């Protein structure tokens, strides 16, 4: 069984990472498997304290791991925007986790994908993330890419690394943004004291966003954000760093407002990519979701 480490799980001890993806196994059992040489990173034997880096390949040679990783398929409706024999584009609703965690194993996009596609999903990132190329936060709705096999998964990851994707989001932020269009190029890394958050830091990873104003309201701005890189919480951190947090994003400083929403008003609404193994470019765009329209209507009716 193979896992490829992404930026969300890098800088984690290998024994803690395995405890995360294998919650049914004790940490002492995991450490014994590592010491017995049944877990390798980049084909090398390692210690339980080994710190993982992005793109490390973790190989596990232990049948018991497979048994603990079973995620149940669930008959959850999927909004399939586009698909072919190799991949699918899903419109993920707000409130749905992209993949299971140690706390939640049901109701996620992966549970729905397993019901729809069965074993016809890539497993490069393990059963917890079957088919998942990139993720969206629970309360961010919109377009997400799914790979139906490992060859397609590798193709799409390579496209992302080479910036051959174009991912665009629409959001409502606090305050009036005066510039019509500008760039934010500030490195992002894990918050030093609040590990569930990201922050701007000099030793962080390159993070580049392009912001374009669509409409200004009394004390809010409707914007489009184009991602040049795709870091965890990138849009939320970048906009908060310039004093314009996303509407109702309490994690990054917006605070509570009169109109209730399921946290941040942010939607991945447009996606452009190369159809795998061809030169054909696919461009997809979806309408504003219910949450965005509700907030826009509120702001329009309260000038």
Image (cartoon, helix red, strand yellow):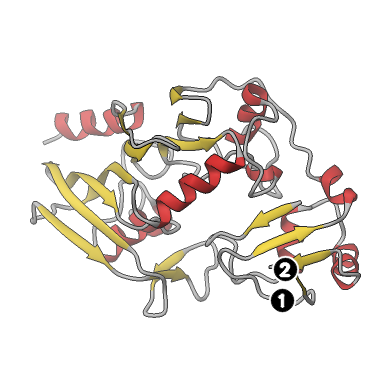
In the rendered image of this protein, does residue 189 appear above or below residue 73?
Answer: below
Dot 1 or dot 2: first in sequence order is: 2
Q: Residue at x 66, y 62 (%)?
A: 57
Tell me the tag on residue 204.
none
The residue lying toward the viewer, choosing from 137 and 292, is 137
Picture quadrant where residue 269 is located: top left
Q: Check disc 2: other Cα within 10 Å, few if <14, some if 14-19, many if 20+.
A: many
Whether residue 200 is visible here, answered yes or no, is yes
The residue lying toward the viewer, choosing from 21 and 191, is 21
In percent of width and height, residue 188 lies at: 39, 68
Q: Check disc 1: other Cα within 10 Å, few if <14, some if 14-19, many if 20+.
A: some
In percent of width and height, residue 205 lies at: 41, 70
Tell me the tag on residue 14.
2
In the image, 5: left or right of 49? left
Whether residue 268 is visible here, answered yes or no, is no
In percent of width and height, residue 208 lies at: 29, 62
Q: Residue at x 63, y 25 (%)?
A: 117
In the image, 294: left or right of 161? left
* Residue closest to the far front: 278
Kindly report the distance in space between the C-alpha atoms of the residues bearing marks 1 and 2.
6 Å
In the rendered image of this protein, does residue 107 appear above or below residue 214?
Answer: above
Q: Are marks 1 and 2 in contact (CB under 8 Å)?
A: yes
Disc 2 secondary structure class: helix
The residue lying toward the viewer, choosing from 244 and 276, is 276
In the rendered image of this protein, does residue 295 appear above or below residue 224?
Answer: above
The residue lying toward the viewer, choosing from 201 and 46, is 46
The residue tagged 1 is 50
Disc 1 secondary structure class: loop
Q: Residue at x 46, y 23 (%)?
A: 80
Picture quadrant where residue 72 is located: top right
In the image, 233: left or right of 8? left
């Amino acid at each position: 069984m193979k896992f490829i480490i992404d930026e969300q799980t890098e800088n984690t001890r290998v024994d803690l990472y395995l405890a995360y993806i294998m919650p049914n196994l004790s940490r002492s059992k995991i450490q014994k498997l590592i010491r017995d040489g049944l877990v390798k990173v980049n084909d090398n034997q390692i210690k339980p304290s080994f710190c993982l880096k992005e793109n490390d390949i973790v190989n596990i040679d232990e049948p018991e791991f497979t048994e603990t990783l079973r995620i149940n398929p669930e008959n959850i409706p999927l909004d399939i925007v586009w698909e072919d024999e190799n991949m699918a584009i899903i419109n993920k609703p707000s409130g749905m986790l992209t993949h299971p965690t140690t706390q939640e194993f049901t109701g996620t996009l992966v549970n729905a994908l397993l019901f729809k596609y069965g074993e016809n999903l890539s497993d490069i990132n393990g059963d917890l993330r079957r088919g998942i190329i990139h993720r969206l936060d629970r309360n961010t709705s919109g377009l997400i890419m799914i790979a139906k096999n490992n060859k397609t998964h590798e193709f799409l990851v390579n496209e992302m690394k080479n910036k051959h994707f174009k991912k665009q989001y629409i959001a409502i932020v606090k305050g009036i943004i005066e510039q019509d269009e500008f760039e934010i190029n500030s490195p992002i890394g894990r918050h030093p004291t609040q590990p569930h958050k990201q922050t701007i830091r000099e030793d962080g990873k390159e993070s580049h966003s392009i912001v374009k104003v669509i409409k200004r309201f009394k004390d809010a701005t409707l914007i489009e954000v184009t991602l040049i890189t795709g870091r965890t919480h990138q849009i939320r951190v970048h906009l908060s760093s310039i004093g314009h947090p996303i509407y109702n994003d309490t994690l990054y400083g917006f605070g509570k407002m009169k109109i209730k929403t399921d946290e941040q008003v942010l939607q991945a609404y447009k996606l452009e990519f190369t159809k795998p193994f061809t030169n054909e470019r696919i461009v997809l765009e979806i309408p504003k979701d219910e949450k965005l329209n509700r907030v826009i209507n509120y702001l329009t009716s309260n000038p």
